[in-house]
C-alpha cells in the first residue's frame, strides 16, 4: 500500500497565542509525545514541530491518511490537556504533496509571521533530530525533512528574501523604535539569555540603546551574553532591584512559569514615580503576566502584536516570495516523484533478480567446458545483454508519472514476467 504523509496543526494564522501557548511542547515533553505518536494505529513515522507560532504533527501512514485526522486531533488535545472542541476551529489538515509543500514552506519561513526569518529552520532541525534520536522518524520523513532544509537553503541563496526579511527579534526592536524617539538615554532589561533574547538585544544595541541588563535563571548564561554584548548581568534573585531601572523590558524565557507578575511591576512603577514602562513578551507560552497591561503607564505587547510591525514589510518581499514559492513547487514535485517511485522498488528488484538467476543458470551450463578467459568473456557478455534488455523497462518504472494511483503498471510487470511465481528449472 502506498504511504501517505499527513500533517495536522495550528499556527498564528489560525489560533491566538492563548491557544498556541497551551499546546507548545516544552523541554522534556517532546520525546514521550513522539513515542506516543508513533504508537498510534497505522502511524509508521512521526515528527513534531513546536515553535512560538505553530504546533504541527507530521506522520507517515499506509493508505488513506484522512482517516487519521481525528486520531491526530485527539493526540494533540490529550497530550497537552486541551479540549478537542477548543482546537476544532484552529486546526488545518494537509495530505500528500500538500503536506510536503506546507513543510517546505515552513522550513523556508514562507509561512512565518516574519517571512524570511532564520530561526524556524534551526528549530525544525533541532526537533527533527529528537524525532530521529527516539526512532520516531524513518526513511520517508528523513528524506522529507532534510529536503525541506535544503530547499530553505536554496531559497536563501537564490532569492533576496533573507535580505528583505527580519527576525522576530528585529521586529521587536522596530516596535521599540516606534515607542521611543531615542535610545541613547534608555535602559533595556532583557529577561532570558537564549538565542531569541540575544538576537533581540543585538538589534536594540544597533539602535543605540544606552544601557543593557541581562537576567536569566542561570546566572552564568546571563554573564556570557552580557559579556558578549557589553551589558550588565543581573542575578535572577535580584531582578526586583533592577526592574525599576528599565524603560523597556523584553521577555524571551521558555517554560511554563511567568518571569514577571503584576505585583512586581506595580512595585517597580511606584519606585519609578510612575514613569512609563514598556514590555515586549516574545515567549510562547507568554512569560509576562497579561495583567501587567492593565496598570497605568505600563504598555505590554506580545508576539501577536508584532504582526502589525511586520505587515509593513510584506509588499517589499512579495516578488522574492513568489520566486521562493516556485522553488518550493518544483522541489515538492521532485520529492513526490521519489515517494511514488518507492512503490516500484520491490518490482524493480524482483525483475532484476529473476533475470539474473536465469542468466546465471543458463550460462553455467556451458561455462564448464570453457577456459577461465572464455568464462569471463561469456559472463561479461551475458551481463551486458541483460542490462541492455532491462534498461528501458526499469527506466520506465522509475520515471515520474509512470505509476498510476492503483499501481496497475507494477502489477502488469509482475504478471508479464511471472515475478510472483516460482522459478522454472
Image: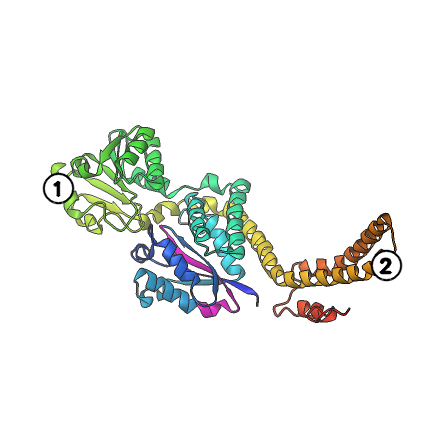
Q: Give the range drawn in magenta.
A: 52-68
Cα separation, mark 2 vs mark 1, equals 99 Å
| Residue 194 sits in quarter | top left
Viewer-nearest residue: 4 or 323? 4
- Would residue 58 be counted in the magenta stretch? yes
The reply to whether the C-beta atoms of the residues labelled 2 and 1 are less than 8 Å apart is no
Q: If the image is split into quadrants, where does the N terminus sit? A: bottom right
Q: Badge 2, how many Cα within 10 Å: few under 14, some, many 20+?
A: few
> Looking at the rendering, in which quadrant would you find the C terminus?
bottom right
Q: Earlier in the sequence, mark 2 or mark 1?
A: 1
- Could you say whether the residue bearing mark 1 is in a helix, strand or loop? helix
* Mark 2 or 1: the one toward you: 2
Find residue 204 and report its horizontal and vertical position in percent: 32, 34
For residue 362, what is the image quadrant? bottom right
Q: Which sits in the foreground, 17 or 277?
A: 17
Residue to which mark 2 is pinned: 366
Question: Which residue matches tag 1?
Answer: 267
Amino acid at each position: 500500500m502506498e504511504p501517505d504523509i499527513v500533517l495536522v496543526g495550528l499556527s498564528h494564522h489560525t489560533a491566538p497565542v492563548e491557544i498556541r501557548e497551551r499546546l507548545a511542547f516544552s523541554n522534556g515533553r517532546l520525546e514521550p509525545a513522539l513515542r506516543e505518536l508513533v504508537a498510534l494505529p497505522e502511524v509508521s513515522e512521526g515528527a513534531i514541530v513546536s515553535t512560538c507560532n505553530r504546533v504541527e504533527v507530521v506522520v507517515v501512514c499506509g493508505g488513506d491518511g484522512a482517516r487519521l485526522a481525528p486520531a491526530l486531533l485527539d493526540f494533540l488535545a490529550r497530550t497537552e490537556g486541551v479540549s478537542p472542541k477548543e482546537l476544532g476551529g484552529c486546526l488545518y489538515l494537509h495530505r500528500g504533496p500538500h503536506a510536503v509543500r506546507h513543510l517546505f514552506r515552513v522550513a523556508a519561513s514562507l509561512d512565518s509571521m516574519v517571512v524570511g526569518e532564520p530561526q524556524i529552520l534551526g528549530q525544525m532541525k533541532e526537533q527533527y533530530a529528537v524525532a530521529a534520536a527516539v526512532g520516531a522518524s524513518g526513511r520517508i520523513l528523513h528524506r522529507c525533512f532534510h529536503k525541506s532544509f535544503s530547499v530553505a537553503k536554496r531559497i536563501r541563496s537564490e532569492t533576496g528574501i533573507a535580505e528583505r526579511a527580519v527576525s522576530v527579534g528585529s521586529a521587536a526592536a522596530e516596535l521599540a523604535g516606534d515607542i521611543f524617539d531615542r535610545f541613547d538615554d534608555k535602559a533595556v532589561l532583557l529577561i532570558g539569555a537564549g538565542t531569541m533574547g540575544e538576537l533581540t538585544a543585538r538589534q536594540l544595541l544597533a539602535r543605540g540603546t544606552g544601557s543593557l541588563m541581562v537576567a536569566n535563571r542561570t546566572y552564568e548564561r546571563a554573564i556570557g551574553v552580557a559579556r558578549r554584548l557589553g551589558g550588565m548581568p543581573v542575578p535572577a534573585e535580584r531582578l526586583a532591584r533592577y526592574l525599576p531601572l528599565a524603560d523597556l523590558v523584553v521577555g524571551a524565557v521558555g517554560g511554563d512559569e511567568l518571569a514577571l507578575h503584576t505585583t512586581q511591576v506595580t512595585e517597580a512603577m511606584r519606585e519609578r514615580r510612575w514613569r512609563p514602562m514598556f514590555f515586549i513578551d516574545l515567549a510562547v507560552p507568554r512569560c509576562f503576566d497579561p495583567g501587567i497591561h492593565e496598570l497605568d503607564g505600563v504598555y505590554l505587547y506580545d508576539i501577536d502584536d508584532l504582526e502589525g510591525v511586520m505587515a509593513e514589510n510584506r509588499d517589499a518581499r512579495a516578488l522574492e516570495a513568489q520566486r521562493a514559492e516556485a522553488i518550493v513547487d518544483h522541489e515538492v514535485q521532485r520529492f513526490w516523484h521519489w515517494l511514488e517511485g518507492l512503490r516500484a522498488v520491490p518490482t524493480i528488484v524482483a525483475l532484476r533478480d529473476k533475470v539474473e538467476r536465469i542468466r546465471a543458470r543458463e550460462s553455467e551450463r556451458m561455462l564448464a567446458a570453457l577456459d577461465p578467459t572464455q568464462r569471463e568473456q561469456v559472463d561479461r557478455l551475458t551481463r551486458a545483454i541483460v542490462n541492455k534488455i532491462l534498461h528501458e523497462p526499469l527506466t520506465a518504472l522509475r520515471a515520474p508519472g509512470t505509476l498510476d494511483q492503483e499501481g496497475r503498471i507494477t502489477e502488469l510487470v509482475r504478471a508479464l514476467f511471472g515475478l510472483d511465481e516460482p522459478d522454472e528449472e
